[in-house]
Image: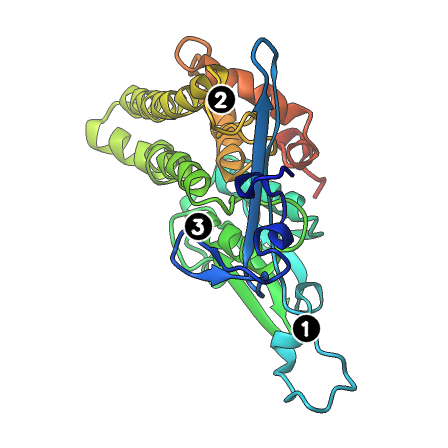
């Protein structure tokens, strides 16, 4: 903290012990923090002729106090909303092919939140998925989307069984329900969050969809030539990862030139992995699996990937860590 108002380092100083209003960007004012407020801090300093020192984004949310059980003046809350997430959501089980990019991303998210889970084996799913397995009654009872390998998170919400399919919907649930627990894959800062989702959309909505076996099989069937499908897949992967390379390289270029962006080693310049990294790790693996030479056109991504190998969220989610059935 400093002597001038723009140098104050705490909410208490900014509001001068609650005697002054602090205006927020959205027009609201605060004298003290309120329940639900997100507190985001990042900073750096640099003296002429010296290196830059600082820290990346640190964020937290103000949670409401849990009512004391003996406080009779408060109305009794619904039991499900009063329970802590660890008490309300239990018995997690993940269904999916271990080699699936979506399953891999969710395993990283579960590791980030420190949520124990069982790997489901209701149907035999492996790297060579056949149409009979995908259209079976047992498959459709778990996953509502036919012709796709099931990536489904199942858990108990009190006494009710809940199943959520689609990787981004699952991760959105984990981030919301376990907001206070473990790491955060979606930053609170609006710009940082948007950049994470920008990368995720390129991978999840474009690249992964075009490399799926069902798409490649359709191309082979229509063309009558198996090589066309594989070549299409490689081109789709290269196009998607080239786009991600440009986004990520720009972020890291701004940082290396002393910009005000975050300064970490991960995809969006953060000091910890985000959802962008959780989607990028399996996509880079699958690119190599399908014969794409990554070093030639996405060197920034290859360098960032090295960080994943040493990070505990990624280590147990890798294909090599597949549990014995």
Residue found at x 43% / y 20%: 254
- Quadrant position of residue 237: top left
Decide which of tag 1 and tag 2 comes sooner along the chain: 1
Whether residue 134 sits left or right of residue 266 in the image: it is left
Q: Nearer the viewer, residue 132 or 302?
A: 302
Determine the residue located farthest toward the right in the rendered image: 70
Give the Cα distance between marks 3 and 1.
37 Å
Q: CA distance from mark 1 to mark 2?
A: 44 Å
Residue at figure coordinates x 64%, y 54% from the top left: 12
Of circles 3 and 2, the one toward us is 2
Q: Which residue is mark 2?
A: 289
**Which quadrant holds the C terminus?**
top right
Instruction: Measuring from the top left, give residue 233's x and y in whole percent.
Output: 34, 25
Residue 252 in the image: state x and y as whole percent: 47, 20
Q: Secondary structure at mark 1?
A: loop
Tell me which corner region of the image, top left, top right, bottom left or bottom right, holds residue 305: top right
Q: In terms of depth relative to the viewer, which is nearer, 154 or 44?
A: 44
The circle on residue 83 is 1
Dot label at residue 164: none
Q: Earlier in the sequence, mark 3 or mark 2?
A: 3
State the residue at coordinates (20%, 27%): 223
Do the residues under discs 3 and 2 have CB atoms within 8 angstroms?
Answer: no
Residue linked to disc 3 = 134
Asked if residue 125 is positioned above or below residue 161 in the image, the reply reads above
Q: Earlier in the sequence, mark 3 or mark 1?
A: 1
């Amino acid at each position: 903290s400093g002597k001038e108002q723009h140098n104050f380092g705490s909410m208490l100083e900014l509001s001068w012990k609650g005697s002054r209003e602090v205006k927020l960007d959205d027009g609201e004012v605060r004298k003290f923090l309120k329940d639900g407020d997100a507190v985001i801090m990042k900073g750096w300093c640099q003296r002429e002729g010296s290196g830059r020192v600082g820290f990346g984004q640190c964020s937290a949310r103000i949670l409401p106090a849990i009512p004391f059980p003996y406080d009779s003046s408060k109305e009794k809350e619904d039991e499900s909303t009063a329970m802590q997430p660890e008490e309300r959501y239990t018995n997690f089980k993940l269904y999916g092919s271990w080699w699936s990019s979506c399953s891999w991303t969710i395993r990283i998210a579960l590791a980030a939140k420190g949520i124990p889970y069982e790997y489901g084996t209701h149907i035999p799913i492996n790297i060579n998925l056949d149409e009979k397995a995908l259209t079976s009654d047992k498959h459709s009872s778990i996953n509502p989307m036919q012709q796709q390998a099931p990536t489904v998170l199942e858990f108990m919400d009190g006494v009710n069984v809940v199943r959520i399919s689609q990787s981004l919907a699952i991760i959105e649930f984990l981030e919301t329900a376990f907001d206070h627990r473990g790491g955060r894959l979606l930053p609170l800062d609006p710009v940082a969050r948007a950049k994470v989702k920008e990368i995720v959309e390129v991978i999840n909505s474009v690249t992964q969809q075009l490399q799926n076996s069902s798409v490649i099989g359709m191309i082979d069937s229509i063309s009558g030539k198996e090589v066309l499908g594989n070549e299409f897949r490689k081109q789709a992967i290269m196009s998607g990862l080239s786009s991600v390379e440009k986004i990520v390289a720009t972020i890291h270029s701004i940082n290396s030139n002393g910009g005000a962006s975050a300064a970490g080693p991960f995809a969006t310049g953060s000091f910890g992995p985000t959802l962008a990294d959780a989607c990028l790790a399996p996509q880079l693996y699958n690119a190599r699996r399908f014969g794409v030479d990554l070093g030639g056109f996405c060197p920034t991504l290859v360098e960032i990937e090295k960080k994943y190998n040493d990070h505990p969220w990624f280590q147990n989610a890798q294909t090599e860590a597949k549990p014995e059935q």
